[in-house]
Amino acid sequence: MGWAPGPQALPRDPSFSLGNETLKVPLALFALNRQRLCERLRKNAAVQAGSAVVLQGGEEMQRYCTDTSIIFRQESFFHWAFGVIESGCYGVIDVDTGKSTLFVPRLPPSYATWMGNFCYLVPHRAHYQVGSESVAGLSDTAPACCRDSELFAEDQGP
């Protein structure tokens, strides 16, 4: 799956759509979904303070031993929470604060040779409206499952 369009192609009111003649879902809905998830989990007595939700997005799969990909479909819960369509991403939601962090794969520059240019972190941040804060030293601060990813963006929560 390719990366989102560059900043020059970003619409003023970002939305998720599968193309012409389909409904457009405002990206604010995904932030609302994360907020509702946190509210429900905080009401659940079995969920301890300081808990976090870690979601793994779908992985792109190759057809046999070729360079042809099977049509990628994002993991449903991950898409519901973040609205992300790219493969290989992770998301973390702090239940207490509602703050969310999105991680995208760390791709080598050679990726562009075969797959075309891909969007860097700042345009992704604007496209998915997850926030604008970035963190240095990701490998030290990220959960182990996210250490091969770049910090995408952080949401300051509700």
Image: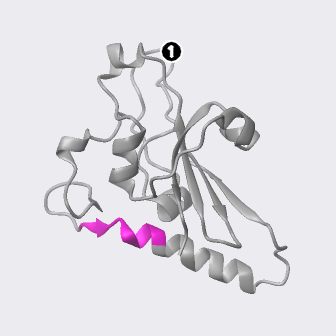
Q: Is residue 145 left or right of residue 13?
A: right
Q: Name the residue under label 1.
A: 65
How far from the left and from the top, in percent, is residue 66? 44, 15
Q: In this view, does 142 lie to the left or right of 51?
A: left
Work out whether 82 lies above or below 85: below
- Residue 145 in percent (x, y) is at 71, 40
Residue span colored magenta:
24-31
Secondary structure of the residue carrying numbered label 1: loop
Give the residue drawn at x 53%, y 76%: 158
Residue sitting at x 58%, y 54%: 101
Foreground of the two, 13 or 56: 13
Q: Which amino acid does label 1 sit on?
A: Cys
Name the colouring of the figure: one colour
At label 1, counting other C-alpha atoms closer than 10 Å, the crowd grade (few under 14, some 14-19, many 20 or more) is: few
Q: Quadrant of residue 71?
A: top left
Above or below for 150 versus 97 = above
Q: Is residue 128 left or right of residue 147?
A: left
State whether residue 24 is above or below residue 111.
below
Across and down, in percent, residue 85 comes to 40, 48
Total label count?
1
Image position, residue 136 (x, y; %): 61, 37
Q: In this view, does 121 lie to the left or right of 105?
A: left
Front position in the image: 17 or 141? 141
Instruction: Report which quarter residue 22 is drawn in.
Output: bottom left
- Which residue extends farthest left? 21
